[in-house]
Amino acid sequence: MTKRTLTAVSAAAALAATLLPMTSEAMPAFARQTGKTCLTCHFQNFPVLNAYGQEFKAGGYTDIGKQGQIKGPELSIPEVLNSTLIGKFRAVTTNESGATTGYNIPDEFGLIMGGRAAANAGFMVEASLVGAPALAGFKIPMTAYKTDGGTRFSIVPFAHVGIGAGFGMELLNTGAVSNVRVFEHGFATSAQQYVNGEYGSWGVSGVVTDASFFVNVAKWAQGWGAGGATVYSPDSTYLRAAWLGNIAGFESGAGVQITSGSSGVAGAQMDTKSTAIDFQAQGSVAAMPLGVWLSYAAAPKSTATATNFFNTSQTNDVNALSLSAQLGAFHHAAIKAGYRWAKDGDGNGDNALTLGGNYHLAQNLGVVVEHTLFTAPGVHNAFNAQGMNQKNNGGSARTTVMLETAF
């Protein structure tokens, strides 16, 4: 580890530890609508969902709580348009040759609006206040039918510049989508993020949710940009199915993801093939909150006639296995660790160890610190067609120190 990296780690320790990645799935706009605190929906810290948060999200953000409504025939909306300002202020240090600490002030700063649009429909719109595109994404979950037993059938049109095909509905916290994960260094701690990463997409999801399971089947297209200018047809298929339940007092879940088909335009289509399985358990030990997350993901190699969007290498399949945990060790703070075993498209071992912690100045304000050690620096970045800029670009270590806000 270089002196520069050690300095960053020391500064991080002085600040205490970390909160979790800012996400459009966790915002005070929902707290304003429901009249409930952030931790009503989140396990330890956002964006990690607990069982109540899963129910609120599955219901399309329509629970309105005590907030005033404007009601009439076929109309039920809040009196105000609920919104949130989110921000990430970040310093990142690597030990790449010639690298220096990079400061992103802010790295992200956005306006999120969302919540109830009708008794049976919700919405979320994300706008970037720094950089492009101005419209970063949206989704509109609409309940088509709900049984007396609580099983809900929904349709969700969606688009986002970086969250991927599962954006329509995801209830687990393993990194199945890039905005619902435990670590800021998702590429180093989530098998799905290592294999699938962050990519633009648009499509329509058909969703079935229940207290004991959820299923998301989407027809989608890779690529979506400012103003919806990318017009690939939604020819790919995304299948997500997961069980939700309780194991020894831990809120648990286990599921599978299958992405298949191809997307693009004539003469420039790419296969979209990958699979994943995952598991989570969230509860407490000795009165301290403890979460454990496990995932495995793989993407087959490309061929001479068909390039795989998730693995452009024609040499080997890409695969990864990840295990991470977070313990609320003392008031306002938690410690966490994650390990990722992986093989890249050349068959090289590509493992990563990440250590970090969370310190909450408030439920919606915190400091993020994570330090990752890589065993195969710089060898894997070329094998993902989506050009994931969050992966390690050389060097054997990366440290992130970040202030994260949501108001």
Image (tube, grey):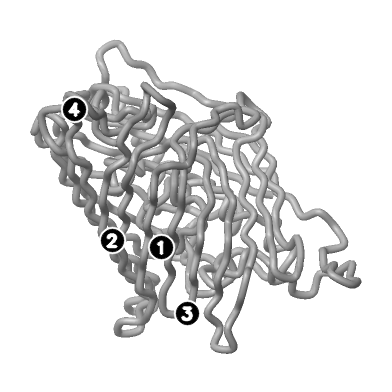
Q: CA distance from mark 4 to mark 1?
A: 29 Å
Could you tell me the amino acid type at mark 3? Ala
Label 2 vs label 4: CA separation?
Answer: 25 Å
Q: Earlier in the sequence, mark 3 or mark 2?
A: 3
Q: Nearer the viewer, mark 3 or mark 1?
A: 3
Tag 4 residue: 313
- Kindly identify the residue that appears in the image at 46 percent across and 39 percent down: 221
Viewer-side label of 4, 1: 4
The answer to which quarter of the image holds residue 34 is bottom right
Helix, strand or loop at mark 2: strand
Do the residues bearing badges 3 and 4 touch, measured as CB atoms within 8 Å?
no
Amino acid type, label 4: Ser
Task: Name the image quarter holding residue 394.
Answer: top left
Report x, y in % for residue 309. 31, 33
- Mark 1: secondary structure: loop
Q: Quadrant of the N terminus?
A: top left
Between 76 and 96, the residue placed more toward the observer is 76
